[in-house]
Structure formats: C-alpha cells, structure tokens
Amino acid sequence: MNAHMRSSALGSRMAVKQTALHRLPQQRTKSSVCRAQTVADLPAPLQKIVGAFQMVPDPMARYKQLLYFATKLDVLPKEDQIPENKVEGCVSQVWVKPELRDDGKLYWKAESDSQLTKGLAALLAQGLSGTSPEEVLRIEPDFIEMLGLKQSLTPSRSNGFLNMFKLMQRKAAAAAVTAMQAEEAGLVIEDESSKHAGHAAMMVAPGKPATKGETHFKVVVVSEQFDGLNLVKRHRLIYSILQEEFSRGLHALSLDTKTPAEAQS
C-alpha cells in the first residue's frame, strides 16, 4: 500500500500519534502478560548503561559517574540549539536532536549549559543511540528508577530528566513517521472535513462563529501490531492514542485497520 497524507497540520500530528501503535498493543494481545519493565526489556545500549550504574552502590559515586558521562557527550551544534529541540520544564537549558541514518537507527546529540544536566543528556543520548524509533517508543519512563539516581537528583532535576526523555520519544515518533512514509508503509490520512462543514457548524458554541477546522478524517492503518486484536480493540486503540486530538476539535474518524497479511489478501 502506498502511503499518502494530505497537507494538514492535524493530519501530521495524527501521523505522529499513530506510531504509538508500536508500543501500546503489547499489553492487549492474547499472548502477552502485563508485567513490570525489566532491564532485559531495554535496548542493548541502555541496558549497558543501567547495568553500569547498578554496579555502583554509593550515591556519591553514581553522581560522579554521571558527571563523567557529561565529558563524553556528542555535542549538538549551535545551529541546532533551537526551540523545537529544547526541553521544556528543565531547570537548565538543554537541547536534544536525533539523526535517523540509513540503517534505520537513531543517533542522538545534545547540549546543556549545566554539567549535571549535560551528564543526564549524555546518558540518554548514548543509551538511545543505535536504537530504532520503535525501540525508543517501547521504553517505559520508569526505567529511570533503575538507574538509582533518585538520591542524587533534586525533584526538579528528576522532572527535567523525565521531560528530556519524553521529548526524545516524541522525536523518535516523528522519525518513525518519516521512515514509514519513505518505505511506503501502510498509513493513509485523508481530510474529509469539507464534506461535513454543516455538521461542524452545528458543533460551534452559541454566539461563536463557525470555523473551517479539521474535524473529520479517513484513516487507513496497516500495522503488524493489530495481529490478534479484533476490530473493536483496534479501533479502541486508535481512539486512545488520539484522545488529545479529539479535545482539540477532531470529531470523527472513518477507520480501516488491517494487519499486513490482511492488506495483501
């Protein structure tokens, strides 16, 4: 199936959200069992770093190890230290940016004006470099607890570290969409809002003018993550991913969800 997307701001955001399919269904298939994330579930580069920190029992020694990571950071060039790469909600200024290479893996660079934050950025940059976008999206934020850095970080630093990780996941999702489009994977998004202009106008609150918003979309998704899920569960999964978009004005989706095998039959 050829991937096609109409030019649309909401359509682009929906495409990014669609990549969350790679990490949500694991707890929904018949063969999987809900369980806590372990070190073995992490990508190999991150496993190595978590293991290194777990081998150091002393909090002060872990703190020094973090500062050592700061000296190994692959620094982000000045021209890439821009708002779209900046981590919000961080005590210090910090920027992160990935490069999706021909091998399908992400390689990260970062920069910060604080040595401690630079160490945290380096930890994530090294731990997530050489991984696929899907691997990054499957990581649960609680892996941070495995590092044993809680005693070494203030609550604001811990929150900044989490925000850094979340931004990297969003960028990984965007990279996954780019790869999906390049490989002509199964994602089709068509804006059908113009066909429902009257309906959209009826939804406007009294006294407010109607707008030409993006409210109705036809979405076709082909993903191996649908394997083992019935139609209701597939649709429920898509709707759960797009909850934020519905709060922004998205009203209805026409969904066609298939596994690769179903798409070829």
Image (cartoon, rainbow, N blue to C red):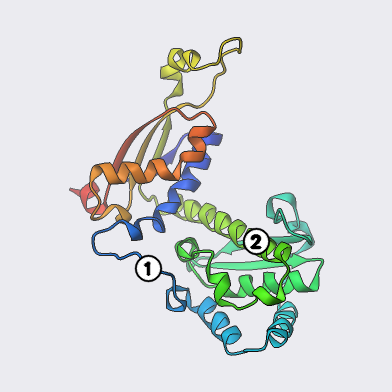
| Quadrant of residue 257 within the rendered picture | top left
> Mark 2 falls on what kind of element?
helix
**Where does label 2 land, which residue?**
164
Residue lying at the far top of the rendered structure: 207
> Mark 1 falls on what kind of element?
loop
Residue at point 81% right, 69% down? Answer: 114
In depth, the one of 241 and 104 nearer the eye is 241
Residue at point 50% right, 65% down? Answer: 102
Q: Position of residue 217 (x, y in %)?
A: 41, 30
In depth, the one of 125 and 184 nearer the eye is 125
Q: Position of residue 40 (x, y in %)?
A: 43, 78
Q: Amino acid at mark 1?
A: Arg
Residue at point 53% right, 35% down? Answer: 10
Q: Which numbered dot is residue 264?
A: none
Residue 245, above or below 149: above
* Of callouts 2 and 1, the N-terminal one: 1
Residue 7 in view here? no
- Number of disc labels: 2
Residue 178 in view here? yes
Residue 122, above or below 156: below
Could you classify mark 2 by the number of other residues whose Cα lies within 10 Å: few (under 14), some (14-19), or many (20 or more)? Answer: many
Q: Is residue 263 left or right of residue 211?
A: left
In depth, the one of 155 and 105 nearer the eye is 155
Q: Is residue 31 left or right of residue 151?
A: left
Q: Which numbered dot is residue 35?
A: 1
Residue at point 46% right, 15% down? Answer: 197
Residue 79, above or below 37: above
Residue lying at the far right of the rendered structure: 113
Q: Amino acid at mark 2?
A: Met
